[in-house]
Image (cartoon, coloured by chain):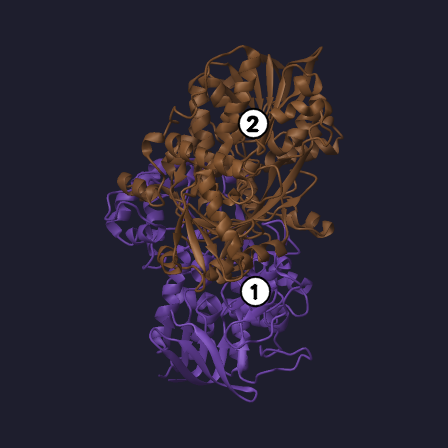
Chain colours: A brown, B purple
Amino acid sequence: MTSLDTKVVVIGGGVTGVAVLRDLALRGIDAVLVERSDLGTGTSGRWHGLLHSGGRYAVRDEESARECIEENLVLRRIAPHTIEDLGGLFVLLPQDDPAYAEQFVVGCKAAGIPVEELTPGEARKREPLLAERIEAAYAVPDGGIDSWALIRSMVADASSRGARVLTRHPVVGFERDGDRLAAVRVRDLAGGEDVVIGCEWVVNAAGAWAGQVGALAGVPIEMIPGKGVMVVMASRYVRGVVNACRKPADGDIVVPQHEVAILGTTSVQVEDPDDVTVDPAEVDRMIDMCAQMVPSLARGRVLRAFAGSRPLYKPPQQAGEDTQDTRAVSRTFTVLDHAERDGLANLFSIVGGKLTTCRQMAEKLVDRLGERMGVTVPCTTAEVPLPGADHGVHTLAGPLATVEREGAYGTLICECELVTAGQVRQAVADGVVELEDLRRRLRLGYGPCQAAFCAWRAAAAVCERQLDTQVRAAASPAAQGGSHDADPLAGLARFVQERWRGQLTTVWGDQARQALLNHAIYRGIFDLAADQPDEAAAWRTGGIGRQGDGQAEDSRSEGLEREASERDDPAAEVGRGLIGDPDRTSAGTEPG
Amino acid sequence: MRADVVVVGAGPAGLAAAVRLAEGGRQVRVVARGQGFTHWGAGAVDVLGRVGGERVERPLDAIDRLGDSHPYRLAGTGALRDGLDWFRDFAAAAGLDHVGDPERNRGQVTALGTLRPTCLVPAPAGGELRGQVAVLGFAGFRDFSAALCARGLERAGYQATAATVELPPWSHRRYFTAVELSRAFDDGDFRARLAPALAKAAAGADVAVVPAVLGLGRGHEPWAELERGAGLPLVEAALAPPSVPGLRLFTAWRRRLDELGVAWQLGFPATGVERDGDRVTAVRCEGASRPVVIRCDEVVLATGGVAGHGIEANRDGSLTEVVAGLPVAGFEDRTHFIAGRFLAAHPIGEAGVRVDGELRPAGDDGAPMLENLRCVGGLLAAHDPTMEGSREGVALATTARLTAVLGAADHADQDVSRR
């Protein structure tokens, strides 16, 4: 067991936790963030990538809409490199209610969202694949945002100011001292031992998993994970975001993101935030509904489907002792001060919210925390640009321009996503050994071929780097023993299995040929074999949708958890609870 | 346009069928959507590598353990032996000697340092791994990592070291592929300059493993000469597609088709057939600018399964044979196409057309549905070419059977070709 000390422990490595960490760092407050898996593996990695203009909330929820447009503008200023300036349309189809469109325009204006009505002709000029018959279209400043790039930038900024981040360190318990939490106990999944982090304050930013963290601390937090299914198409189809101009419902948004388009989404309440199964009928529905707006989607090539859990928070029914919660700055997210609420003096939770407003959520939370700590330094997160901001906004052609400028064609590891050997080597030098983590950093394996060619090249890069390290460490056996000596073929098998999980409901047509080609490469040519989890077994016996990984998941830590739970180890429950990170959606049932 | 026989598909089965029928005196025309599993495979002749997921030592003996409707059971062991013998002669005549024994499987080393089960391999992949193995990569070639291959070999119990060899200057663009590099090996000067570097990098080793890129257009001669120059056995490791050994073979097939006067067109997919009762009278193709109809007496479908685009897997779980609309058993829904484990067997891998003993598509009662249309290779039901490791074996066995059925069974080169 080792120990360390800090002022604030932040639990959860999603956008909210990371935004809190950065806010603390900018105010000069020492903090450590702990995350059960890799950063951005929970809800932050499982969504459609929409930088909200607020248009989706314009009719029903003016406060949310206002927050969205404010933060939309802030993020464009401080983190342009994580944003693609797509623009968005709300499209009124013949079957939609024209009255909704009128309310939409009024709502946008009230919330301060710039909105411009286009004729059907103008809309189709802008989006040539729109349906032949549309009644009207409204342009709003929707954008695309890469949550992993945002997370990395915020972490880089916070780290440069002294903040520390421990990934693959699930919380296993708290040490209490009277009405205070004196320390957070986390488990180092790589090293196997516990780390005790002594602290003065704890922030629970575990998002959909906040209830599980609360349970460990002995405070009830009722989270209602809201599962949303998304479908990934093999190309972009649209130039900007396309929304249906109707009350938000299943399959009403198409977001182009990097090389693909993401169709969203459903909203189903589930018991367990780790339930990210996908039902094939949901995939069909998503395609059919979105094809009303963009008909060619119906015959398109579908790459994957995945689900994420919205961190929806259910405020207690009884006002009584919980009235303090209503001090929460907004209906869309809630800061819980457990001193007032539960008599636990130094714990705050932040629940609800959405990715677009993560910075604002952090600001409100740290304002409250600072008040209690007696820290008066004001928040500057809306003014200080993130590292990388000088690159300007992300453009689709940006990665290609970089490859051309550097003449890096010969070193491409992933042709679909233009990942170069230099990028992989750098990531490996930074300590990444798991191909899954490379995927989140570099988008390795995201394109149409679904890792047919990149994964084994990346495995080679990791292996070569380890070999170098061993050669260098040969004189120093201690260093060698400490290195993570992973079996590259086992890592490769894990990676291709993770890619497969997302495809379980999407193998037909071209993608069926691709799947069999990939099988012929990995199983046929390379004779790769491994004990893999049977994703379908649970699905078939359970009678519900299957696992669909879109953007994240960590098979290694899952494996550990599974093992632990088989031993009936209480830590298993804890581990499962602690991918923290809230993200985008407001409390309520509105999708996306 | 007219032909005695139209062969649809240019993978191992279509090419073997076209050559054998032309050698038997039939006037043959080949049309295909694109290249087949010569390019996409490991460049070996897999006969039967696994049954029920377990590796097989003796492929011919293991055929008894396959289901009744497996293509090997339909074609018979005799046809398989005939196909393999015919292929070895054909390949040897083209300068592509194969080694191996149909009675016993062997391991073919791969870029991951695994030993995939196969039966016959081209001579450059045939050396035995023994003693100290030096794995040699080539600087700047991204599709083979000596470190990764050596690591895999160590995992498999070999003593292996990794080294990277600088290539002599050669004309290429800023980056190069396996195919471009393999062409450089066709140049004797290039090989002469490289050989000492190989010898040096492999000093002390008993055998060296190199990526399968040692020459493209000159058979196995570049490999043999480089092996002499380096002074130790060189073993080519199978890479991801496109397969250079497969391309060598494809070149040989094409040359043989040209010798036999067989017209072949790639990028020319068949889209339908015309029928008169239970006979097919013509194949419709999608030409570059217009549909083309080829009248014929016989049709051979060698379009492959789902992987080869002979069968379309539909969103509702059904399967469609794409040329003649032959019946293919579908699934309850699309999720049943596949297994939850990526590296396990996937049910659509063995989807295909059921045929009678003469390779004609059969109805539920087992009777042939069409008199003059036959199916060979991956299109056939009841085998999974990838999981079983049977792709080339099934292609050769069923084309041997086809040749017998169409009365053109003569072995080897009789000069009976006609235009």
**Chain ID for label 1?**
B
Task: Name the residue type under label 1.
Answer: Asn
Q: Position of residue B73 (x, y in %)?
A: 64, 70
Residue B314 numbered mark, or none: 1
Q: Tag 2: Cα neighbours inside 10 Å, few (<14), some, or many (≥20)?
A: some
Query: Is A166 in front, or is A8?
Result: A8
Q: Which residue is drawn at the image coordinates 26% and 42% (left, top)?
A: B168
Q: Position of residue A28 (x, y in %)?
A: 46, 14
Q: Is residue B146 above or below residue A388?
A: below
Q: Secondary structure at mark 2?
A: loop
Q: Which residue is drawn at the image coordinates 65% and 70% (left, top)?
A: B69
State the CA–CA distance, disc 2 to disc 1.
50 Å
Q: Position of residue B33 (x, y in %)?
A: 42, 69
Q: Which residue is drawn at the image coordinates 55% and 14% (left, top)?
A: A371
Is B171 placed left or right of B135 in the picture?
left
Q: Which residue is drawn at the image coordinates 41% and 74% (left, top)?
A: B31
Q: Position of residue B234 (x, y in %)?
A: 40, 46
Query: Is B386 in front, or is A237?
Result: A237
Which part of the image, by quadrant, shows the N terminus of chain B? bottom left
Q: Secondary structure at mark 1?
A: loop
The part of the image, by quadrant, that contains residue B164 is: top left
Task: Name the residue type under label 2.
Answer: Val
- Residue wearing tag 2: A329
Q: Residue furthest bottom?
A: B276
Query: Is B353 in front, or is A73?
Result: A73
Query: Is A559 in front, or is A178?
Result: A178
